[in-house]
Image (cartoon, helix red, strand yellow):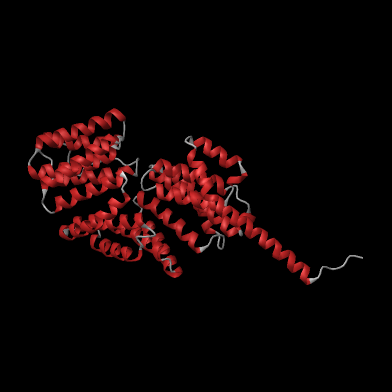
């Protein structure tokens, strides 16, 4: 006759199972940094992808979390790397076992965040239709009450808002970010709240509400911890300096730039230093120090061309052109425009951006170019960078 297991025996078995599960979780957590290093050591992206898909060693929730973070961090500097890291994160997330994640909610959250990060990487590369399609399974999960935790929900809505913003859909972007802000406030996630406020402030700036943008950026900076989120803190500082300068408060912008320069130098990578130099040019221009601004803009433009970052070079070139207009240096403007147009034409970079620059060149040749036209072309290039379907339609009749 079989004896019914005693309470103590059942309790001991459950405790052993929990201990085994916790041990596996601890092993996964310890293994994750080594797995990341192993993947990064492989230079060919397809070899990384094959390893992740075929080897169960890599079906690790902590590795998935690390890859998502790598994709997020890379988005600031290298969109191609961001895409590769997000693609690996999705591959890992789709192969996770529920037991290794402790709960279905954690597994669903990791999968949704990995997919959303991949969609964000597509957005950053200007592949908006693909990004919209990539978000579809995430939106399905968001509609199912209880499938995702509040923190994951906020992170996903934040990324979705970025896609709306790129597509100039400011109202839905703002509504999503308001939800994100409410969630982070309720959870007491102050760093994340600061980042969300920074995102929300950008929409205010895009819609011409400079004073409101400045106030919100100051709130964001009060919340973001520069030790935990150095890059987000620096981006918020950068945006605040630009906004102050645009609002005609260039002396305030200069003072803040003085205190922000060490943060750029601490990061030390070349692109961050170029952003600093560009910012120095913008503030110098706002203060009327036109020669100083021109020198900075030339340095940054040349460096971007050396790095094959032609679109960035064009954006800086337009700032240089605005300075040259104020100084009456029309011949130099013609040379700047021709150089950028030659690069755009040779590399077939962006037909509509090329069209906008050609339009400006025609106006310069007829001595009809003014700061308003330069600003219009600059605004178009900024918008067209994340919206490849945008068409350039000048507000005034084209030069004949």
Residue most extreme to the left: 328
Left or right: where 359 falls relative to 74: left
Q: Quadrant of residue 335?
A: top left
Q: Give the percent coordinates (x, y) of residue 74.
A: 40, 47
Q: Foreground: 110 or 393?
A: 110
Kindly identify the residue that appears in the image at 26 percent across and 35 percent down: 305
The answer to whether residue 49 of the structure is visible from this angle is: yes
The answer to whether residue 63 of the structure is visible from this angle is: no
Q: Foreground: 362 or 290?
A: 290
Q: Give the percent coordinates (x, y) of residue 176.
A: 41, 60
Establish if 213 lies above or below 386.
below
Image quarter hosting the C terminus:
top left
Kindly identify the residue that appears in the image at 53 percent across and 35 percent down: 47
Left or right: where 271 falls relative to 91: left
> What is the total number of numbered labels drawn onto the structure image?
0
Q: Quadrant of residue 105?
A: bottom right
Q: Foreground: 146 or 241?
A: 241
Q: Foreground: 254 or 110?
A: 254
Image quarter hosting the N terminus:
bottom right
Establish if 389 lies above or below 162.
above
Q: Give the percent coordinates (x, y) of residue 329.
A: 8, 39
Kindly identify the residue that appears in the image at 44 percent across and 70 percent down: 186
Left or right: where 378 falls relative to 129: left
Establish if 382 lies above or below 139.
above
Q: Give the percent coordinates (x, y) of residue 323.
A: 13, 45
Kindly identify the residue that appears in the image at 28 percent across and 58 percent down: 237
Q: Quadrant of residue 141?
A: bottom right
Residue most extreme to the right: 1
Residue most extreme to the bottom: 7
């Amino acid at each position: 006759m079989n004896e019914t297991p005693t309470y103590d025996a059942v309790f001991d078995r459950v405790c052993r199972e929990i201990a085994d599960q916790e041990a596996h979780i601890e092993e996964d957590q310890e293994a994750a940094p080594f797995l990341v290093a192993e993947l990064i050591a492989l230079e060919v992206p397809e070899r990384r992808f094959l390893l992740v898909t075929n080897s169960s060693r890599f079906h690790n929730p902590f590795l998935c979390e690390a890859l998502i973070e790598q994709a997020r961090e890379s988005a600031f500097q290298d969109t191609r790397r961001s895409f590769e890291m997000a693609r690996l994160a999705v591959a890992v997330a789709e192969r996770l076992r529920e037991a290794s994640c402790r709960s279905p909610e954690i597994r669903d959250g990791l999968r949704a965040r990995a997919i959303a990060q991949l969609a964000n990487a597509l957005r950053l590369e200007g592949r908006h239709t693909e990004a919209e399609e990539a978000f579809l399974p995430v939106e399905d999960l968001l509609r199912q009450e209880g499938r995702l935790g509040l923190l994951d929900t906020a992170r996903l809505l934040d990324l979705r808002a970025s896609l709306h913003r790129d597509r100039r859909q400011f109202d839905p972007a703002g509504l999503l970010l308001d939800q994100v802000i409410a969630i982070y406030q309720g959870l007491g996630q102050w760093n994340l709240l600061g980042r969300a406020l920074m995102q929300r402030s950008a929409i205010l700036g895009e819609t011409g509400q400079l004073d409101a943008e400045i106030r919100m950026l100051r709130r964001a900076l009060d919340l973001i911890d520069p030790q935990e989120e150095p890059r987000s803190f620096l981006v918020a500082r950068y945006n605040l300096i630009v906004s102050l300068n645009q609002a005609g408060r260039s002396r305030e912008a200069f003072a803040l730039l003085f205190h922000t320069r060490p943060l750029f130098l601490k990061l030390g990578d070349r692109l961050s230093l170029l952003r600093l130099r560009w910012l120095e040019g913008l503030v110098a221009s706002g203060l009327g120090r036109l020669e100083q601004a021109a020198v900075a803009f030339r340095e940054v433009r040349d460096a971007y061309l050396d790095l094959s970052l032609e679109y960035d070079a064009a954006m800086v070139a337009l700032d240089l052109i605005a300075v040259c207009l104020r100084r009456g240096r029309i011949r130099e403007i013609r040379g700047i425009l021709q150089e950028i147009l030659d690069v755009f034409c040779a590399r077939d970079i962006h037909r509509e951006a090329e069209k906008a620059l050609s339009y400006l060149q025609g106006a310069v040749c007829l001595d009809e170019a003014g700061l308003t036209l330069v600003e219009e072309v600059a605004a178009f290039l900024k918008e067209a960078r994340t919206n490849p379907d945008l068409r350039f339609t000048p507000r005034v009749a084209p030069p004949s």
